[in-house]
């Protein structure tokens, strides 16, 4: 299908975001299981409720826009899932495993933030009805918080290695 309007682009990106969020539920569970430390397990285990809320907000957007909630896959998301599968099979060292888990989580959050930024811009330009923009903004705030939590873990780890 050719995309010829901002609305068609918005609809496609919303379906891609929906797909990503549904995949993220499993991704975070897999990353939590693969983590070596309780701290990293907690980062991903604690994000499940937020992801369910984000999916609910996206489904509310579909309803407001009178769209069927439907997923559209993304090669980027599929690549991230393949990356996760590869690292789970290869990385045995605990410190390296935690580093890989956090890195994959950060890539995921950045992808999510990028999709949300594009959707927010399009929703504003299209003047879509409430709560479209507010739901997207709320999801973006949560994704940014999750990214910051992962970045904080890396900063603390870097600081610990500098002091040892």
Image (cartoon, rainbow, N blue to C red):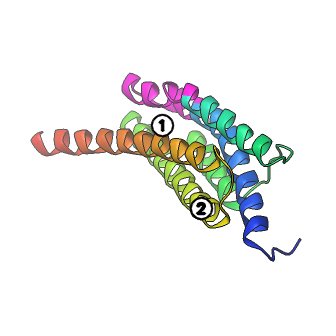
Which of 137 and 110 lies nearest the eye of the viewer?
A: 137
Mark 2 crowdedness (10 Å alpha carbons): few <14, some 14-19, many ≥20 = few
Which of 52 and 84 lies nearest the eye of the viewer?
A: 52
At mark 1, the secondary structure is loop
Residue 29 lies, in percent from the top left, at 60, 29
Q: Which mark is residue 124?
A: 2
Residue at left 77%, top 58%? 11
Task: Name above or below for residue 8 compared with residue 79.
Answer: below
Which span is picked out in magenta?
29-49
Mark 1 crowdedness (10 Å alpha carbons): few <14, some 14-19, many ≥20 = few
3D distance between C-alphas at marks 1 and 2: 46 Å
Tag 1 near tag 2, CB within 8 Å: no
* Residue 97 included in the magenta stretch of the image: no
Residue at left 76%, top 43%? 64
Q: Is residue 141 visible?
A: yes
Task: Name above or below for residue 29 compared with residue 163.
Answer: above
Residue 57 lies, in percent from the top left, at 65, 37
Q: Locate residue 127 relative to residue 108 in the image: left or right.
A: right
Which residue position is annotated with label 1? 92
Residue at left 77%, top 60%? 12
Which of 127 and 12 lies nearest the eye of the viewer?
A: 127
């Amino acid at each position: 299908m050719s995309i010829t309007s901002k609305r068609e682009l918005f609809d496609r990106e919303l379906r891609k975001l929906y797909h990503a969020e549904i995949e993220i539920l499993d991704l975070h569970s897999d990353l939590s299981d693969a983590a070596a430390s309780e701290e990293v397990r907690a980062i991903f285990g604690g994000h499940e409720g937020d992801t369910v809320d984000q999916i609910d907000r996206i489904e509310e957007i579909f309803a407001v826009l009178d769209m069927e909630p439907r997923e559209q896959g993304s090669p980027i998301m599929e690549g991230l899932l393949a990356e996760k599968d590869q690292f789970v099979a290869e990385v045995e060292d605990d410190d390296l495993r935690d580093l890989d888990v956090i890195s994959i989580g950060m890539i995921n959050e950045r992808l999510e933030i990028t999709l949300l930024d594009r959707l927010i811009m399009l929703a504003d330009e299209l003047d879509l009805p409430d709560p479209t923009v507010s739901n997207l903004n709320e999801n973006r705030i949560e994704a940014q918080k999750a990214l910051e939590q992962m970045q904080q873990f890396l900063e603390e780890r870097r600081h610990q290695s500098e002091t040892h």
